[in-house]
Image (spheres, rainbow, N blue to C red):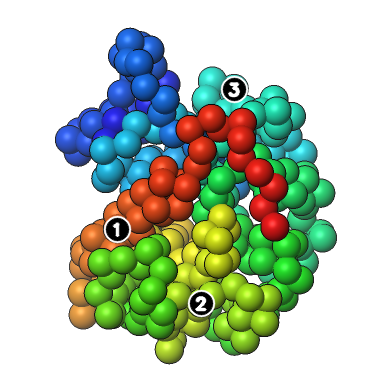
Amino acid sequence: MPIKISDSLPARAVLESENIFVMTERRAASQDIRPLKLAILNLMPTKVATETQLLRCLSNTPLQIEIDLLQTSTYQSKNTSEGHLLNFYTTFDKICGNRYDGMIITGAPIEHMKFEDVAYWPELCEILEWSGSHVQSVFHICWGAQAALYYHYGVPKYPLESKVFGIFEHRVCDKKPQLVRGFDDVFLAPHSRHTEARAEDIEKCGIRVLAESDAAGVYLAASRDGRRIFVSGHGEYDADTLALEYFRDKDKGVEIDVPRNYFPGGDPGQKPRKTWRSHAHLLYSNWLNYYVYQATPYDIGRITTNS
């Protein structure tokens, strides 16, 4: 699919090298169609890697998508160059009058903190509240999913005895929603987190748990109207993302287990294989098709408040 992004965004060269159709702003301006408008609130410190991963997952449909990259104004990343943020990112106060067909809110490596202790928590609460009346469907990832479940429904997060870290098998436990259309009964996905939201708490709020793992817990849940999607893992990850995290912590002297079911033979000296690519692309394609493209009004100004 054609993803409309800035001509100079670093992700462009990476995606084009993988034969992914990326449409520059110049070419998109010549087409007489309404692209889907998506906002990505990128809370990850590795912003360039994360935006590239997400754009890759959004690439597998025939829909044209226009992306706005957002950062928080109350906390600025120390791991991404100021020039990159100034050139490619905007803040909520600049776009709060817009409406969007879809939005992605990423995770953040701050799970040990209470939600209220996070520097940008008040700003995130404002964005979450705004999304209910300005976005057709919001796709929340990992800590972003926990934060949204807590803000909207009061669902708590719980610390885990040990980090869920690696590639885990999941089963589809509710096959009716279109979000899991075409999924295998069992599929693989990466996790990297120290906390969890539990199925019993989620289901008490009327949210459907669609996929889970015996080892990693809830993976995928959604509101019944499809306007809020919650994913506890990281289907968007590259093949080497967990390896980079593992070796980074090892080099810092941080105690960390070898990611499970990831390195061939459990040997960190071996190159990991990406075994979750097809599932990740299908998840994002289903979300874009059934919950964004087919649900949003053509006149984007007619998006109504999420109940």
What's the amino acid at mark 1?
Answer: Leu
Q: Amino acid at mark 3?
A: Leu
- Specify the amino acid type for callout 2: Val
Q: Residues within 10 Å of mark 3 (few under 14, many from 20)?
A: few
Quadrant that contains the C terminus: bottom right
Residue at x 35%, y 16% (from the top left corner): 32
Marks 3/1 in contact by CB < 8 Å: the verdict is: no
Q: Does residue 276 appear anywhere in the picture?
A: no
On the image, which quarter does residue 26 sit in? Answer: top left
**Nearest the eye: 250 or 7:** 7
Q: Where is the N terminus found, in terms of image quarters?
A: top left
Q: Which mark is residue 209?
A: 2
Decide: is 160 above or below 7: below
Q: In front of the other: label 3 or label 2?
A: 2
The one nearer the camera, 191 or 81, is 191
Q: Are marks 1 and 2 in contact (CB under 8 Å)?
A: no
Q: Which residue is mark 3?
A: 86
Q: Position of residue 120 (x, y in %)?
A: 76, 47
